[in-house]
Image (spheres, helix red, strand yellow):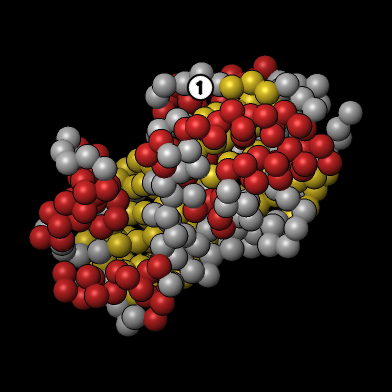
Amino acid sequence: MTAADRTAPGPDPDGPVAVLANPTAGRGRHRGLLPGVLERLARAGRPVRLLEAHTAAQAERACHAALADGIAALVTVGGDGTVHRGLQAVAATAVPFGVVPAGTGNDFAADTGFPTGPLAAAEAIAEALRAGRTGSVDLARMTRADGPPRWYGAVLAAGFDAIVNERANRMRHPRGPRRYDLAILVELARLRPRRYTLRLDGEPLQVDAVLVAVGNCASYGGGMQICPDADPTDGLLDVVVGGRFDRRTLIRVKPRIYRGTHVQHPLVSSHRARVVELAAEGLTTYADGERALDLPVTVTAVPGAVRLLRGAGPGTGGRSTRFTVP
């Protein structure tokens, strides 16, 4: 029995399909596709309810409220950030979850078998909902000594990549991808290894590193295979540690992340565990590309924590389950 089987609320067979859409995802290039996505989702034979939200906090509240009201499924239309908001509501419930990839980075959707095209993904979700077919995959649960848990589907970044995101998010100019490029240049000039203290299933490990990534899935940042061997159905987390890199070496190795071959570099080590405790001074984390919790955190792999609505073809993976439909 999976986590999703044990925890309420469950899907309401007579409820609507709730849709959380981010019109700015992918820099707005899919904005005109939303009516077509909603029309295809409606082919599941249920009403479609578009959730209203203008901020990340509103998005999460809207998803939680929709589940409390009773829905047949929750679908996100956007990138990994939109997925992240939806996961906070559906994690460890039996409510099916669908992803229409329409963002700059669609790593969770790609790594869990959704079609890459938004309209094709919507059609696959509607077909799975009509058939009452889901495939469950793992999620990662983050906790601190204070505050509620947070969930993520793809990768937790704690190091240079998170620092760059922090820098980019504080900058007002330039706009678009150039802001991120400038943030990389600024932080490369400040690059230094930090002391990390980890416990992997209780086994202590101290390392000096510029990057630590904890992956439920393999990729982040729009296809960068930071944890290339991560499998969201194995009940484990992959931990990739980038050690005492200097600026020049990091610049040379960075392109290899897209192929996942960076893990062969002698300064990179890989580990696998069900529970990862991670601490370092003065660092925050980014999960699914979104600002998450400050260190220290404990990350736990939760098997079968979300039921995904996907197509029935090859490559969809996951643990197949069925639920009752009228």
Under circle 1, the secondary element is helix
Residue at 77% of width from left, 32% of height from top?
A: 44
The three-letter code of the residue at mark 1 reads Arg
How far from the left and from the top, in percent, is residue 244? Answer: 22, 72
- Judge whether residue 290 can be spotted in this image: yes
Residue at 61% of width from left, 32% of height from top?
A: 36
Q: Taking 83 as reference, is 54 above or below it?
A: above
User: Count of labels shown?
Assistant: 1
Q: Residue furthest left?
A: 189
How far from the left and from the top, in percent, is residue 267? Answer: 30, 78
In the displayed structure, does residue 291 sit left or right of residue 140?
left
**Residue behind mark 1:** 61
How far from the left and from the top, in percent, is residue 40? Answer: 69, 34
- Judge whether residue 8 can be spotted in this image: no
Residue at 54% of width from left, 35% of height from top?
A: 33
Residue at 58% of width from left, 48% of height from top?
A: 117
Q: Quadrant of residue 213?
A: bottom left
